[in-house]
Image (cartoon, helix red, strand yellow):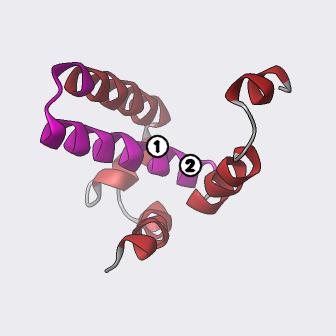
Amino acid sequence: MNNNEVLKELAAVLEARKSESPDASYVASLYAKPDKMLEKIGEEAVETIIAAKNGDRDQIIYETADLWFHSMVMLAQKGLSPDDILKELARRFGISGHDEKASR
């Protein structure tokens, strides 16, 4: 699978997991416990920060992948897709971060 297909394929798998048993699927277990899902995002964010602070390239990649994964689970649970996020990033492209933040 090439890099351009990963988000789309993962989103499809996460959507399919909505109908799985929480006992049979880690993702389904997160859907069953939304607070746990949100805690995992926080945990992975902290681990990503620590990896970045330590400067270990492989650990940064590993922890960021975990953070993205758990964020995608949350997006799927909320009925959102990676495309929704990519559209927002595209909207912001070429706009000063200061200007974009001030416009909210």
Dot 2 falls on a residue whose secondary structure is: helix
Question: Which numbered disc covers residue 71?
Answer: 1
Residue at 27% x, 54% y: name it. Answer: 23
Question: Which numbered disc covers residue 75?
Answer: 2
**Magenta stretch bounds:** 52-80
Residue 32 pos. (x, y %): 44, 44
71 lies left or right of 78 = left
Q: Quadrant of residue 38?
A: top left
6 lies left or right of 57 = right
Q: Nearer the viewer, residue 71 or 62?
A: 62
Dot 1 falls on a residue whose secondary structure is: helix
Task: Verify whether residue 43 appears in magenta.
Answer: no
**What separation in Å lies between label 2 and label 1 (alpha carbons)?**
6 Å
Question: Which numbered disc covers residue 11?
Answer: none
Q: How many marks?
A: 2
Is 39 drawn above or below residue 59 in the view shown? Answer: above
